[in-house]
């Protein structure tokens, strides 16, 4: 079976997505799991979703910003976030916004669970170092491997109870100090490879500024694209 590519947190960054898809296909990937946060906070929201919809064998789950974009009242009452949602909604077809907001929250394939932040929340997640609430976040989970995203930090670690936690990192807005796009490949034997791909992040930053000007959310996105930092 060809490798499975796992892509999370794309955030409307079409050039990063295209680079990752090229890399994944060159590695033989034919199947994709898409872990949420597809359009919001990026320069190419509609175009990014259009590109993802071309994937013939992709499984999608919903991220918190997909939920927020479809239901702005569920998002924080923060001007930056609400302005970004308004801009994203204006750039996308209403039917597509609704479609993303209606995606399933989780996916289980064989012995692996895919969720956006954690199995119990699309906001509360895991960090590279163990946290006190991890047992709660994994409550009811029977699978030995859990993929998640949300924090934009690429890592993997094995818990003492044998559950493997894997964050493939962010395709569109990494926040670990490395501006390269991040994703994961799962081989036929189940082995996971965390990968990084160079792309023109400066061009994505320029596109954000050109399209959305000096709006606060756009300025934050530009900084993240330029530095790989929150």
Image: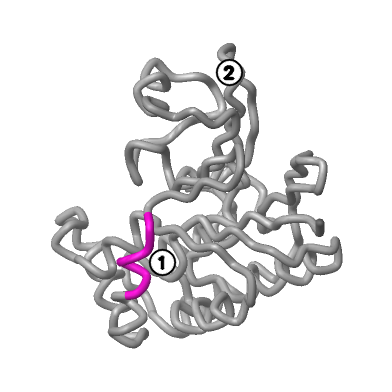
Q: Nearer the viewer, residue 114 or 229?
A: 114
How is the model colour-coded? one colour
Q: Height in image: 62 above or below 162?
A: below
Cα distance in 3D space between marks 2 and 1? 32 Å
Does 154 sit left or right of 49 as displayed?
Answer: right
Indicate whether residue 65 is drawn in magenta.
no
Task: Return the residue nearer the eye: 114 or 169.
Answer: 114
Question: Decide: marks 2, 1 in contact (CB < 8 A)?
Answer: no
User: Residue at horizontal 38%, vertical 58%?
Assistant: 104
Residue 189 sits above or below residue 163 on the image: below
In front here: 12 or 79? Answer: 12
* Residue 100 lies in the magenta stretch: yes
Q: Report x, y in % for residue 148.
A: 51, 43
> Mark 2: few, some, or many residues within 10 Å (few <14, many ≥20)?
few
Q: Which mark is residue 12?
A: none
Q: Which of pointers 2 and 1 lies earlier in the amino acid sequence? A: 1
In the displayed orientation, state which residue is furthest to the top.
160
Res 147 → quadrant = top right
Q: Residue 72: horizontal and vertical position, in percent?
A: 19, 66
Please, what secondary structure does the residue beneath circle 1 have?
loop
Between disc 2 and disc 1, the foreground one is: 2
How dense is the environment of label 1, judged by Cα within 10 Å: few (below 14), some, or many (20 and up)?
A: many
Q: In which quadrant of the rendered image does the N terminus lie?
A: bottom right
| Residue 25 coordinates in the image, percent (x, y) | 80, 68
Please name the residue shown 65% across and 32% down the image.
156
Q: Which residues are magenta?
A: 99-104
Q: What residue does disc 2 label?
A: 159
Could you tell whether 81 is left or right of 92 in the image? left
The one nearer the camera, 142 or 20, is 142
- Residue identifier under label 1: 41
């Amino acid at each position: 079976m060809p490798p499975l590519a796992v892509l999370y947190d794309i955030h409307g960054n079409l050039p990063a997505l295209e680079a990752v898809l090229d890399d994944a296909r060159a590695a033989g990937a034919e199947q994709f799991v898409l872990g949420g946060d597809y359009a919001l906070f990026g320069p190419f929201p509609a175009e990014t979703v259009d590109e993802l919809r071309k994937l013939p064998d992709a499984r999608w789950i919903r991220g918190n910003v997909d939920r927020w974009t479809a239901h702005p009242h569920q998002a924080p009452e923060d001007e930056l976030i609400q302005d970004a949602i308004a801009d994203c909604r204006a750039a996308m077809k209403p039917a597509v916004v609704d479609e993303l907001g209606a995606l399933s929250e989780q996916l289980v394939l064989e012995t692996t669970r895919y969720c956006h932040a954690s199995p119990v929340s699309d906001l509360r997640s895991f960090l590279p170092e163990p946290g006190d609430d991890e047992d709660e976040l994994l409550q009811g989970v029977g699978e030995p491997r859990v993929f998640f995203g949300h924090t934009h930090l690429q890592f993997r670690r094995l818990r003492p109870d044998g559950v493997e936690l894997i964050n493939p990192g962010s395709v569109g807005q990494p926040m670990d100090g490395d501006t390269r796009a991040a994703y994961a490949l799962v081989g036929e034997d189940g082995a996971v490879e965390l990968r990084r791909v160079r792309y023109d992040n400066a061009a994505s930053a320029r596109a954000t500024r050109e399209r959305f000007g000096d709006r606060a959310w756009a300025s934050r996105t530009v900084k993240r694209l330029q530095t790989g930092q929150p």
